[in-house]
Image (cartoon, rainbow, N blue to C red):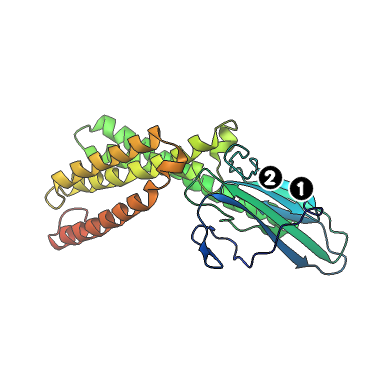
Amino acid sequence: QTLTENPPRDDGLFNIPAYWTGHSLGKKSIPGHGYATFSLQVKLPKHSPKLAFRILEQQSAYAFYVQGQLILSNGKVGINPDSMKPDSQPLIATFQPTGDTLDLILQVSNFNHRNGGPWTAIQMGTPDNIRELRNFNLYGELFVIGSLFIMSLYHFGLFVLRSKDRSSIYFAFICFLIVIRSLSTNERFLLELIPSLPWEHLIRIEYLSFYLIVPLILHFIHSLFPEEVSKKLSQFSAAVCAAFVIFVLVTSTNLFSYSMPIYQLLTLLVGFYLTYVLFLATRRKQTGA
């Protein structure tokens, strides 16, 4: 249906960017699954120049209208799991205003993730400014990705030459996994390399690259300071990581997305433990601490 012929009911105000999960609507708390329409009227100066809009993604499908005209969409919005299709490709579109106001409408639906809603900001500006912003972010990410990839290759080479030094292979894998995670988040450059990559596989890569990094960091620090880091804890972290990895591989995003808050808490605990380990190693004047 066209939005001008059948406008939705006004239920209240909502701050963007944010997930709608847990947001109160009257006395009711909104769940992660559902759909919503957001509208905003923007006042423009007279004789406004051509504008550009940039949206990284919304969770997990959206349609964006300006003056009733669809200019950006990701996936397919719907009112149930069968009628919608998720996607997360960063997009840019231009629009030439003809008046001094803009009516913006954003439709978002989510039945594929624990959290739903317009969780990234909609950026508006001149086409040149939006293009410069996108290029700045993309080139910055690619610089970091390239640097980490070179570091990964370098430490793989060190391990080949000195296979007894396991810290090199751990560090190489850590750098490589950060590269993979960087490719699958933010600008989602991985979709430029593999345009046909399904949304669910992209989210799996995003989760797995994070889950695998944590035990590798623990093993890396253990290889440097074996007296300060518990070997049993390192082995236990690997077993926990394996359980989470299997869970991500065999379940849908609707299920495995709930594992992220638990793993983030475990990551925080590991971070506190490693901070103590490094303090202890420094106090004992261990080499490299």
Q: Measured from the top left, where is residue 99 in percent x and y?
A: 87, 63
Give the Cα distance between marks 2 and 1: 8 Å
Extreme front residue here? 27
How crowded pointer 2 is (Cα within 10 Å; few <14, some 14-19, many 20+) is rated as many
Residue 179 visible in the shown view: no
- Residues 25 and 156: in front is 25
Near mark 1 (Cα within 10 A), the count class, few <14, some 14-19 or many ≥20, is: some
Task: Find out whether the residues at labels 2 and 1 contact each other: C-beta distance under 8 Å.
Answer: yes
Relative image position of residue 246 (x, y in whole percent): 33, 34
Q: Which residue is mark 1?
A: 70
**277 lies left or right of 247:** left
In the picture, the disc for residue 248 is none
Which SS class for mark 1?
Answer: strand
- In front here: 215 or 22? 22
Q: Quadrant of residue 132?
A: bottom right
What's the residue at 84%, 58% (across, down)? 97
- Picture coordinates of residue 265, whole percent (x, y): 32, 55
Q: Which residue is mark 2?
A: 73
Q: Position of residue 76 (x, y in %)?
A: 65, 41
- Asked if residue 155 lies left or right of residue 148, the reply is left
Q: With respect to residue 164, does 217 lie above or below?
A: below
Quadrant in the picture for the C terminus? bottom left
Mark 1 is on which residue type?
Leu
Side (left or right) of 258 relative to 283: right
Numbered disc total: 2
Q: Residue at x 23, y 39 (%)?
A: 239
Quadrant hosting residue 241? top left
Who is closer to the viewer here, 251 or 284?
Answer: 251
Task: Say if residue 203 shows up in the picture.
Answer: yes
When the figure is inspected, residue 75 is found, relative to residue 105, above or below; the finding is above
Q: Secondary structure at mark 2?
A: strand
Identify the amino acid type marked 2.
Answer: Ser
